[in-house]
Image (spheres, helix red, strand yellow):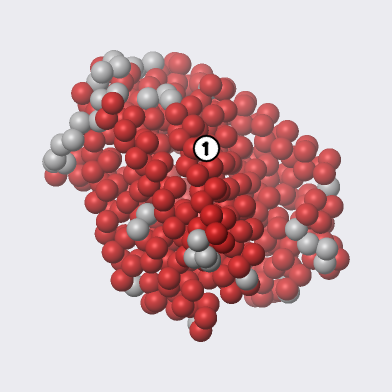
Amino acid sequence: MLALAVPALLTLTTEPLVSLVDTAFVGMVGTRALAAVGVSTAAFNLAFFAFNFLAYATTPRIARALAVDGRNSAEAHRVAGEALVLAAACGVVVALGLALGARTVAHAFGASGDVENAAVGYLRVRALSAPAVLLLTACHGIFRGRGDTRVPLVVTVVFSVVNLVLDPVLMFVAGLGLLGAAWASTIAQWLGASIFLGLIIRQRRARPARIPLQRLRYWLTSGGVLSIRTLTLLLTLSLSTRTATRHSVEAAAAHQIAIQLWFFMALVIDSIAVAGQTLIAGDLGAKRFTTARSRACRMQVWGALVGGCLGLALAVAGPDIGRLFTNDRAALAQLSTVFGILIVLQPLSALVFALDGVLMGAEDFRFLAGHMLFAGAVAGAALIVVDYLSLGLWWVWTALVILTLCRLGAQWWRVYATKSLLARPVS
């Protein structure tokens, strides 16, 4: 589990750290450039959230096929080929949509004037990388399914370093400014996708093939339900941000700091889920049901330990960690009111992420979507009440605790109380 989780953790943290440096370079161009990148990044991320299934659905399918047929499984090669074909096709469609609708998209995100013009130019260049981004997503799923998280780490580090080198060269030396940052990211992501594809072709890990209707239905169903899951979570978190913002500017700032800390620490926990997807899928494919159940329990123990350590680290750092982001005393005071909740959320979130890995490994995608809809509805209702009564930031984060507890309770019931999920092969 550690052999899979540690490289996955480093991979997950590399891109956000590079994005921070990327933002610093853009900040040298000016405030309008930063605003334009903010608009473009939000639009770009929203356009791709629906395609996470290219990794989440690919990993367990390949791991299960390898467990059944061995290292040279024809089924694993076929799944990899289908994932790459879908990634390329969807990437072209998204690229055309973003390029042709760039101005409409920028305007929809509230940009106007010089910011809108800058965002449109940036977004049109970044649209060229859409196929590469989805191919990268599919390749991560392929290699994870084969129990290899080291190659994705190396590839991610390579194209991230290229991005960092190209940023100042294209922005300042070549004089392209903001467009230089867009070209740097686009070139780097195409480089990463090309390296991945070269490795897959050389190692013969994919078989190009047409996708029969029945198999296409699996991909579309998996993509649909996983998109519902992701969208529900995004909407709930967006509602929490809206509620905090309506309370006060200081509450909004404190909420942004707290939620970014939560997201960053979630990357550590998510590495356990990545390992779980591969291992649980392999166990179920080989009909090692007892091993799958014991492995799920060990993942919960690891999750609790990692989450506890993260909570302890936050407790030691204290609310003063917020000074890394702002010196506003009112915002820091607001942050201190929810810091205890943020600490408690670490072990709870770790248990949720670990069980997410189990459920994804079992390809229980419908339940993942259904339980998120339930948890999102409960937490959303709580946030509406908080907003209506103007209860403040502490209650906003209490609603996020409710979201986490609802997810945890539903997942625990599905994995342990039903006693069937890890006692049958995946259909």
Residue 325 on image: x %, y %: 75, 58
**Residue sitting farthest toward the bottom:** 113
Instruction: Work out whether residue 133 can be spotted.
Output: yes
Task: Determine the image quadrant of residue 61.
Answer: top left
Position of 299 compared to 123: left or right? right
Q: How many marks?
A: 1
Question: 96 or 142: which is nearer to us?
Answer: 96
Question: 10 or 243: which is nearer to us?
Answer: 10
Residue 327 to residue 375: above or below: below
Residue 207 to residue 12: above or below: above
Residue, disc 1: 157
Residue 163 on image: x %, y %: 51, 48
| Residue plotted at (37% across, 54% down) | 129
| Residue plotted at (35% across, 66% down) | 98
**Residue sitting farthest toward the front:** 173
| Residue plotted at (72% across, 34% down) | 308
Residue type at the position of mark 1: Val
Residue 34 to residue 191: above or below: below
Question: 255 or 366: which is nearer to us?
Answer: 255
Position of 362 compared to 215: left or right? right
Position of 251 compared to 275: left or right? right
Q: Secondary structure at mark 1?
A: helix
Residue 206 on image: x %, y %: 25, 30
Instruction: Work out whether residue 231 can be spotted.
Output: no
